[in-house]
Amino acid sequence: MAATKEQNLKTQRWQRKRRKRRFLGFLSPGKIRRGRRRYYPGGRQRYSPRFLYSLRVEGFSPGCTHVFKILQWNLCHTLIQGQVVTVNQAKFDRIIWIVLDSVGIGELPDAADYGDTGRDTIGHIARSRPLRLPHLTRLGLGNIKPLENIPPVPCPEGSYGKGATVSPGKDTTTGHWEMAGIWLDQAFPVYPEGFPRTLIEEFERQIGRKTLGNKPASGTEIIKELGDEHVRTGFPIVYTSGDSVFQIAAHENVVPIAELYRQCEIARKLLDGPHRVGRVIARPFTGPQGNYRRTERRHDYAVEPPRPMLLDVLGDLKVPVFGVGKIHDIYNGRGVERYVTTKSNADGMARLNEALVRQRSGLIFANLVDFDMLYGHRKDVEGFAKSLEEFDALLSPLLASMTARDMLLITADHGCDPDPVNPTTDHSREYVPILTYTPEHKGANLGTRSTLADMGQTVAENFGGRIPHGDSFLRELVSAGRRSSRMSAD
């Protein structure tokens, strides 16, 4: 019995010594031989991602910062070989960020400069009829501002606020870039009278055929107007909108999808300097005469974002990023490790839920475009209302699958008020809602954020990084106190 006890003590001492050796070997700037195994700094360790955190050690070499991964330690600082080591523990292992494209929440102070006085996307939709949005309501949507048929709740389950756009403009690129920490000095150019004739002529020369259109238009309306002529001649339809876009529509049976993409790539190279539009967009459609419909093979060609922005920072920190929808296109693929395109909001939420099973850490970044593409620009108030209700219902499985180490962030990039009293179908210069939820923490009032970059800064700080603009609200999220029970996903 005594021998067994002594043997157990020896075993425990040996295990403690082995753990210590592994840890020191992992931190050492060179490889260290430990028995039969070699340990390398930054080498792959067989530990759960939940217990892996970012370790920044400064001073191993002049002007250089070495980033390693270590096991969770209770000490925030320790001394190793005379070096001060700071352990940055991420508050959340995984952040799920969903952008509801065009779901604004009231005019910005400078809305009059854009002709958007009185625009209020959510407000006008909520006024049209009672909305069934139980999850968004409990997260605090009605607490952001007074909304008809969406009452505030006494104790919201999530943190809530609204964000302003600092950069000039009101398009997808401007909004998403600002979320990532990029402030623009000037807005991307728009073409209310169509593109300059010299530009169109050079585009036609390079693609080897004439074009149709060259005017601002609704995408669905212009293929009704010019679709038959396009099918007869094979000339692609070029059009724009109130936003900084150069769009090319073509029937898939007339212009093969690969050729349409090639034409978009040519346009992207041409549209530089003073004509540097935010996006070139391929708009394929199909169907018989009189029943044309746009397909899901849309593709966006954005301009290259300036460095550094959020996804660059996360990439440098080896934080995995999974893009859903047009996220990959908006940032030109920078920092997006894996991505999927989507056919609809429902498909986007399905892809997002699949990603939750596969990716247990990092950022899952999604854009849901139906609100903008199908309802906002078409001034379809009822369709917009039903789409919001559909999204709310699709939140249920996502909320049920979240863990205590997850954070959900829901926002928008701009507005697109479908109220029929508005004279145009363009995007609108609006605040965007900000809703967050974590199963472990209570909700808090985030107030009015001065820039969309506050969201990106929050994500960056969580993973141990920093972006050029924005003030993080991570502290407000984690200091709100712990909740007694998680939000139900009924």
Image: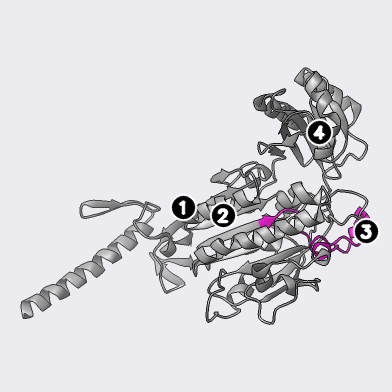
Amino acid carrying mark 4 in the image: Ile
Percent across and percent down for residue 9 are: 16, 75
Q: Which label is found at residue 358?
A: 1
Choose mark 1 or mark 4, whichever is in front.
Answer: 4
**Is 266 colored magenta in this rendering?**
no
Q: Is residue 472 visible?
A: no
In the rendering, at what x and y percent does residue 116 appear? Answer: 90, 57
Mark 3 Cα within 10 Å, few/some/many (few <14, many 20+)? few
Left or right of 190? Residue 261 is left
Q: Give whichever of discs 1 and 4 has the lower sequence position.
A: 4
> What is the C-alpha distance between the residues marked 3 and 4?
32 Å
Mark pair 2, 1: CA separation:
11 Å
Range of the magenta residues?
A: 99-125
Neighbours of disc 2 within 10 Å: few (<14), some (14-19), many (20+): many
Q: Which residue is mark 3?
A: 112
Q: Which mark is residue 32?
A: none
The residue at the point 62 percent across, 75 percent down is 157
Residue picked out by circle 2: 364
Quarter where residue 145 is shown: bottom right
Distance between the alpha carbons at the discs numbered 2 and 4: 35 Å
User: Which tag, 2 or 4, sits closer to the chain's start?
Assistant: 4
Q: Which residue is mark 4?
A: 223
**With 14 as the anchor, is 149 left or right in this view?**
right
Can residue 146 be seen here? yes
N-terminal label among 2 and 1: 1
Relative side of 348 to 273, left or right: left
Q: CA distance from mark 2 to mark 3?
A: 35 Å
Nearest to the eye among marks 3 and 4: give it. Answer: 4
Question: Badge 1, how many Cα within 10 Å: few under 14, some, many 20+?
Answer: few
